[in-house]
Image (spheres, grey):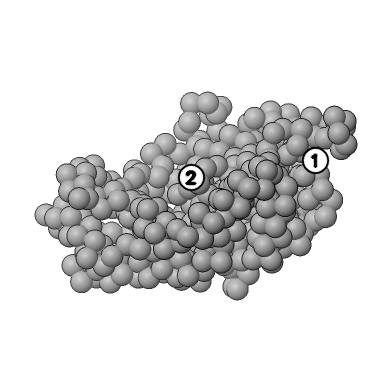
């Protein structure tokens, strides 16, 4: 029996009765799309985030798309995004006919920086999407110092970071809008796709609710073209069960991260392994991504496969090198270096210390040879 990258069955065992009761409640209600269950989750999530409102969406990608639509991003506009992140961040921009402008990321946090954003601004810049990569919260206040005087909105792509904080403030409460994904593998995961946009702007929240339902303002009356971005009641009910457990699960992930660092030190791997920044308040550890010497990465991956240890590579091809996007001038050394060196290790609250020790021993067998 190997060690999984993520084992949701272990989580299920701890909240089985709650989840099954919530599912039965939805089945008996006869309300399966939007409705009271979604409205209750929106209120509870807004309270958790510290925002005045939140709007449930059908996925994290649809949350990004709806947020950009609410900001009236259109063909010819430019939206600044990091070059090292999941495809949906830039793909949502391109779907609206706008141009994603890529910036490199910080060598330690792997998040975009205020300096990078400022250098990429142009007269066509209409928005910036800052990603809290792998659960590490980006320096949103510094980026807003660049954007606010220019009235450029900032979207937090917090798909990987619910539970993370910046100086006590929750990820998702720092920008103009914040987009979340509740894909099952996320720290707060549904049983299928789900997403949400958080905001303090009442007008944007109202527009998001209209856009997620085909731009409908009254029954079969539409004053603009929206989409089918509605969150279903079953996913909302599952998320309502899980949300009160989130902080404990986040602390569990942080404990796993701390154990990895201790094990790396005990086996003398600190010179070979670049672990994520040790910032337990800021980081929600959606992923525990280390960087190893590029020339040894494939050997590490093969050794992990051989021992049936779950792992992944995020992300082999940075966005500025994706063939679907036009070539962009500029240098992206950090993104390209991370793409060559990154390895994601198992991280979830129920991961046992003996399992972590085995993961680290396998890495040591390659990195210290």
| Mark 2, other Cα within 10 Å: few <14 / some 14–19 / many ≥20 | many
Q: What is the CA distance from the residue labelled 2 to the residue labelled 1?
A: 32 Å
Q: Nearer the viewer, residue 81 or 307?
A: 307
On residue 84, which mark appears? 2
- Tell me which residue sits at (56%, 27%) in the image: 326
Q: Nearer the viewer, residue 326 or 24?
A: 24
**Which of the 4 image quadrants contains residue 72?**
top right
Across and down, in percent, residue 321 comes to 47, 33
Residue 144 in sight in this render: no
- Left or right position of 204 against 66: right
Of the numbered discs 2 and 1, the one sitting upstream in the chain is 2
Which label sits in the foreground, 2 or 1? 1
- Tell me which residue sits at (39%, 48%) in the image: 338
Quadrant of the drawing holding the C terminus: bottom left
Give the residue pinned by disc 1: 210
Element type at marker 2? loop
- Tell me which residue sits at (42%, 36%) in the image: 317
């Amino acid at each position: 029996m190997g060690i999984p990258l993520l084992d949701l069955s272990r989580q299920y065992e701890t909240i089985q009765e709650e989840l099954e009761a919530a599912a039965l409640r939805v089945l008996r209600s006869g309300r399966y799309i939007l409705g009271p269950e979604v409205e209750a989750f929106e209120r509870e999530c807004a309270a958790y985030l510290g925002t005045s409102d939140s709007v449930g969406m059908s996925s994290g990608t649809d949350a990004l798309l709806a947020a950009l639509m609410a900001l009236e991003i259109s063909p010819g506009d430019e939206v600044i995004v990091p070059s090292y992140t999941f495809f949906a961040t830039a793909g949502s921009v391109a779907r609206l006919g706008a141009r994603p402008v890529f910036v490199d990321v910080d060598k330690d946090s792997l998040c975009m920086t205020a300096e990078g954003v400022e250098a990429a601004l142009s007269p066509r810049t209409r928005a910036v999407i800052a990603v809290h990569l792998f659960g590490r919260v980006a320096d949103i206040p510094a980026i807003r110092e660049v954007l606010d005087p220019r009235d450029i909105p900032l979207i937090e792509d917090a798909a990987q970071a619910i539970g993370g904080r910046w100086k006590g403030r929750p990820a998702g409460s720092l920008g103009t809008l914040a987009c979340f994904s509740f894909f099952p593998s996320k720290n707060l995961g549904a049983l299928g796709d789900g997403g949400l946009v958080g905001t303090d702007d009442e007008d944007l929240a109202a527009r998001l609710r209209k856009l997620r339902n085909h731009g409908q303002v009254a029954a079969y009356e539409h004053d603009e073209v929206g989409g089918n971005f509605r969150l279903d009641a079953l996913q909302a009910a599952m998320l309502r069960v899980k949300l009160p457990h989130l902080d404990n699960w986040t602390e569990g992930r942080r404990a796993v991260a701390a154990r990895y660092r201790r094990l790396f030190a005990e086996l003398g791997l600190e010179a070979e392994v670049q672990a994520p920044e040790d910032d337990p308040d800021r980081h929600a550890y959606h992923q525990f991504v280390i960087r190893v010497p590029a020339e040894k990465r494939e050997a590490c991956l093969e050794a992990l496969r051989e021992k049936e240890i779950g792992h992944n590579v995020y992300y082999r091809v940075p966005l500025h090198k994706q063939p679907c996007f036009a070539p962009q001038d500029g240098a992206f050394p950090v993104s390209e270096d991370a793409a060559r060196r990154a390895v994601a290790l198992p991280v979830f609250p129920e991961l046992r210390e003996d399992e972590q020790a085995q993961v680290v021993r396998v890495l040591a067998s390659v990195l210290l040879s």
